[in-house]
Image (tube, rainbow, N blue to C red):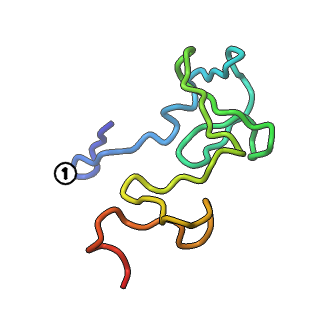
């Protein structure tokens, strides 16, 4: 959206762009309060154990990584052989030149 301010055209960000959009859970339309966490919209005003991911699309995606799933390294990293998942320094950069010395 643009507005005229003096002799200049200024771009205005509409922060309420998604406020009037419908939200869906895997069970159907969700009309309650939402919050944003890790780039995804969740049910409830604040995050809790019962919060679910919502989507603007009826079909999802509604996927969250399971709590008991293994800790994953970043896409640019790999597991250090012989380390425990989730332990400090258990992932290293795939490119050896980018690893700390």
Q: Left or right: 71 with respect to 91?
A: right
Q: Nearer the viewer, residue 33 or 6?
A: 33
Residue 60 higher or lower than 15, as above or below: above
Residue at the image position 71 percent from the left and 45 percent from the top: 67
Q: Quadrant of residue 44?
A: top right
Residue reaching furthest front?
82
Q: Which residue is at 30% across, 71% downward?
A: 96
Q: Is residue 90 above or below residue 35?
A: below
Q: Secondary structure at mark 1?
A: loop
Question: Height in image: 11 above or below 98?
Answer: above
Exactly how many numbered labels are in the figure? 1
In the rendered image, residue 19, in percent from the top left (x then y), is placed at 57, 31
Q: In this rendered view, identify the residue nearer to me: 75 or 22.
A: 75
45 left or right of 53? right
- The residue to which callout 1 is attached is 7
> How far across and how far down the image is residue 3, in percent?
30, 41
Instruction: Name the residue: 49% across, 42% down.
Output: 15
Image x and y of residue 10, in percent: 28, 48
Q: Local crowd at mark 1 within 10 Å, few (<14), some, or many (≥20)?
A: few
Q: Nearer the viewer, residue 55 or 85?
A: 85
Q: For the point 55% across and 21% down, which residue is it?
A: 60
Which is nearer the eye, 95 or 43?
Answer: 95
Extreme-left residue of the structure: 7
**Rendered image quadrant of residue 11:** top left
Q: Quadrant of the C terminus?
A: bottom left
Figure quadrant of the N terminus: top left
Q: Position of residue 21 (x, y in %)?
A: 55, 23
């Amino acid at each position: 959206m643009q507005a005229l301010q003096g002799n200049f055209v200024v771009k205005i960000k509409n922060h309420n762009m998604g406020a009037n959009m419908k939200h869906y859970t895997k069970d159907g339309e969700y009309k309650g309060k939402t919050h944003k966490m890790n780039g995804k919209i969740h049910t409830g005003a604040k995050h809790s154990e019962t919060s679910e991911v919502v989507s603007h699309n009826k079909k999802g995606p509604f996927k969250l990584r399971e709590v008991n799933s293994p800790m994953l390294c970043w896409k640019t990293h790999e597991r250090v052989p012989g380390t425990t998942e989730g332990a400090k320094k258990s992932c290293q950069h795939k490119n050896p030149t980018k690893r700390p010395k």
